[in-house]
Image (cartoon, rainbow, N blue to C red):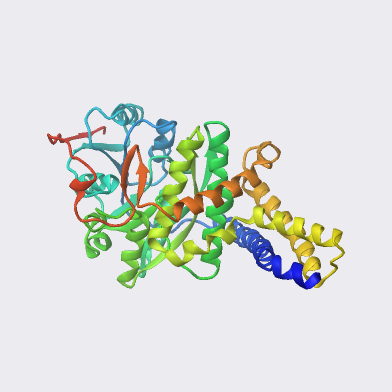
Amino acid sequence: MQEAMLQIYGLPLVLAVGAALYAVVALAASLVSMSRVAAHERRTVASGMPMPVSVLKPLCGAEPRLLENLATFCEQTHPCFEIVFGVSRADDAAVAVVERLQDAYPHCRISLVVDSHVHGTNLKVSNLINLAQWAHHDVFVLADSDIAVPADYLERVCVPLDDPRTGVVTCLYRAVGIAGFWSRVGAQFINEWFVPSARIAHAFGSTRFGFGATLALRRATLERIGGFERLRNTLADDYWLAGHVRETGLRTVLSSVVVETDVTESTLAALWDRETRWLRTIRSVNRLGFAFLFITFTLPWILCGAWLALAMHRAGVHSAASIVLGAAAVPGIAARVILHALMSGAQGAFSRDLALSPVRDALLLAQWLAGSFGSTVVWRGVRGPVEETVSPATVFQPEPANVFEVSDGR
């Protein structure tokens, strides 16, 4: 009977033990990364005058907390920087937000570019192509619109570019759910799955990443890889930007800065669209890695292993397998709970959202299955292809007239 049960439960046993091991490694990688960040925080930024910086901000709509997030870029301690915002339509709601920033920060060089030219299937990259030509400085910092940063962000992020061997600098980010239950579930997607996975990869020496939360590089480096135009038909533009830079022999550096992003999805449908887009994006750039992601959704497998250990015990199967299952469940669950505590942030969030962890991992498993299929994703209400295409007209229809405006709030 013992042999029969081991044959039946062999695969669940491997999954449960593997998931528990992954949870422990994820916790260890997070603790090491956080300790290194703390060490960096105690160091001075850099001696001498920082390089002038152009912050490029493609916008689309007035999302929640847009004004507050963009304002953090206007409050930088960096002595010489500008912010170039870009939209595709003059009636975009984000225009009014930029105008408010220009009024509130007259000392800050803030430009607004309105240009409806569509250069490819990726509308964000089209926006970047349109606004980049108005940047004055030779160091570019790209950051998504939902990112909030500390006051010394620009100074610290750009320091690695002093080294000519550095091609691009990127940042990890912490998520905050600001729209109720489903947004808190979405925040766990980033904080307790995506970020630990990135930290594990980095701990084992991988630099095959580039995050839209921050990408800093020299203008010359961008031109060397063919400019933003090279990314006009790609979905994972941030990943491929860093990847193309590495192809030139330059390295990707993960900054010690951790920025903050908002999760604004208030419904399961909206969250599902966003997260399956992320997973299909991962599939498009790393099929083998995507295929094995299921082991990183730890709690379903660990809990299944604990249940199996109990079932085998009740059936009188006191084997090494049952002992291993029971022994793996304890550190696996403990690691997952500690990781949740590390990433909870706000006071009271730990106990409030702890029960969401099994829901979060079960939902991830379902999304991974859904992400294994399908050839399109939804971004900003527009459906586009997962794989690179060559004909933007097949997906996006450009505006009939092109509107161009540059305003400066100095």
Q: Nearer the viewer, residue 195 or 331?
A: 331
Residue 49 visible at all: no
Residue 7 percent location from the top left of the image: 71, 70
Q: Give the residue displayed 66% in from the left and 67% down from the top.
A: 14
Q: Residue furthest left?
A: 401
Q: How many marks?
A: 0
Q: Position of residue 287 (x, y in %)?
A: 43, 64
Q: Is residue 75 positioned above or below 121 on the image?
A: above
Spot occupied by residue 244 in the image (x, y as percentages of width and height): 31, 65
Residue at screen point 53% across, 60% down: 293
Instruction: State the residue in front, 285 or 53.
Output: 285
Q: Is residue 200 left or right of residue 206?
A: right
* Quadrant holding the C terminus: top left
The N terminus appears in which quarter of the rendering? bottom right
Percent across and percent down for residue 138 are: 26, 55
**Can see residue 298?**
yes
Report whether 405 appears left or right of 52: left
Question: Residue 398's quadrant in the figure?
Answer: top left
Q: Residue at x 69, y 65 (%)?
A: 17
In the image: residue 11, left or right of residue 205: right
Residue visible at 38% across and 51% down in the picture: 374
Quadrant of the image occupied by residue 316? bottom right
Q: Closest to the observer: 33 or 397?
A: 397
